[in-house]
């Protein structure tokens, strides 16, 4: 999955992104965090004259290609950049079904308003909005984010009732619904002797 935190500078994107990465890592889930400031330094693109609409469009498209490549390596990618243009964001979400857009905003004055992008376009569809500051502590904002991202999933392992050399073959799967799990069982049970052992567990996970 790609978790892309967008919003104006100083609103809390990086803070929430780091917390999400820490949660994944604590749960034993592979995840990396790519922050806009770090990415510009890595790609030697940290020059004031670059902050034009034309540059931002080119930069965003390059980042999208790079992030998609990393995500295809079977790792959660957590991104925190301004990413101001709605059209580019919608194109990326339409091309990939594994993108969760998280719009972070604040009512606080944090001293970075002079860095704000004047033509930033707020999201309209298929996104999660998180407000930071004010009455919301960092931890409260993060808990709200997790509640939006958490889903109940079915984890299943099917073990064959036939052994070869004393070892039973097995397969595993993760499903969003019981219906998906049952369809998986219908397909695979005949392959595993008709009466395999199926271990099932439902858990709330981010994803």
Image (tube, rainbow, N blue to C red):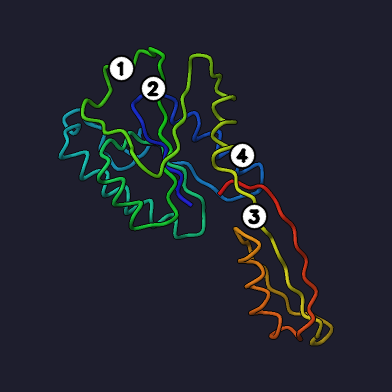
Tag 1, which secondary structure? helix
**Disc with the residue nearer the chain's start (4 vs 3):** 4
How far apart are the alpha carbons under marks 3 and 2?
34 Å
Q: Nearer the viewer, residue 163 or 183?
A: 183
Q: Looking at the image, do the residues carrying marks 4 and 3 touch, with CB atoms under 8 Å apart?
A: no
Q: Position of residue 33 (x, y in %)?
A: 47, 41
How far apart are the alpha carbons under marks 2 and 4?
22 Å
- Say if 153 sits above or below 105 in the image: below
For residue 153, which numbered disc appears in the image? 3
Tag 4, which secondary structure? helix
For residue 113, which numbered disc appears in the image? 1
Q: Looking at the image, do the residues carrying marks 2 and 4 touch, with CB atoms under 8 Å apart?
A: no
How far apart are the alpha carbons under marks 3 and 1?
41 Å
Number of numbered discs overlaid on the protein picture: 4
Residue occupying the point 72% across, 75% down: 170
> Mark 4 highlights which residue?
23
**Disc with the residue nearer the chain's start (2 vs 4):** 2
Mark 4 or 3: in front is 3
**Disc with the residue nearer the chain's start (2 vs 1):** 2
Residue occupying the point 26% across, 46% down: 88
> Mark 2 highlights which residue?
10
**Disc with the residue nearer the chain's start (4 vs 1):** 4
Q: Position of residue 187 (x, y in %)?
A: 63, 79
**Disc with the residue nearer the chain's start (3 vs 1):** 1
Tag 2, which secondary structure? loop
Residue occupying the point 77% across, 75% down: 159
Could you tell whether 62 is left or right of 128 in the image?
left
Q: Position of residue 69 (x, y in %)?
A: 39, 57
Residue 184 falls in image quadrant: bottom right
Residue occupying the point 26% across, 33% down: 121
Q: Position of residue 60 (x, y in %)?
A: 27, 44
Q: Looking at the image, do the residues carrying marks 2 and 1 touch, with CB atoms under 8 Å apart?
A: yes
């Amino acid at each position: 999955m790609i978790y892309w935190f967008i919003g104006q500078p100083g609103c809390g994107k990086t803070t929430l992104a780091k917390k999400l990465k820490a949660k994944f890592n604590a749960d034993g889930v592979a995840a990396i965090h790519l922050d806009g400031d770090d990415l510009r330094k890595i790609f030697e693109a940290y020059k004031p004259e670059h902050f034009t609409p034309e540059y931002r469009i080119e930069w965003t498209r390059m980042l999208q290609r790079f992030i998609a490549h990393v995500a295809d390596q079977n790792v959660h990618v957590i991104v925190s950049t301004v990413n101001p243009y709605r059209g580019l964001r919608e194109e990326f979400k339409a091309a990939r079904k594994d993108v969760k857009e998280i719009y972070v905003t604040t009512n606080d004055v944090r001293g970075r308003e002079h860095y704000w992008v004047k033509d930033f376009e707020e999201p309209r569809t298929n996104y999660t909005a998180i407000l930071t500051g004010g009455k919301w502590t960092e931890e409260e904002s993060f808990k709200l984010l997790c509640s939006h991202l958490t889903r109940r999933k079915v984890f299943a392992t099917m073990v064959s009732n036939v052994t070869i050399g004393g070892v039973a073959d097995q397969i595993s799967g993760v499903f969003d619904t019981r219906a998906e799990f049952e369809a998986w069982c219908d397909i695979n049970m005949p392959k595993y002797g008709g009466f395999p052992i199926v271990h099932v567990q439902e858990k709330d996970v981010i994803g």
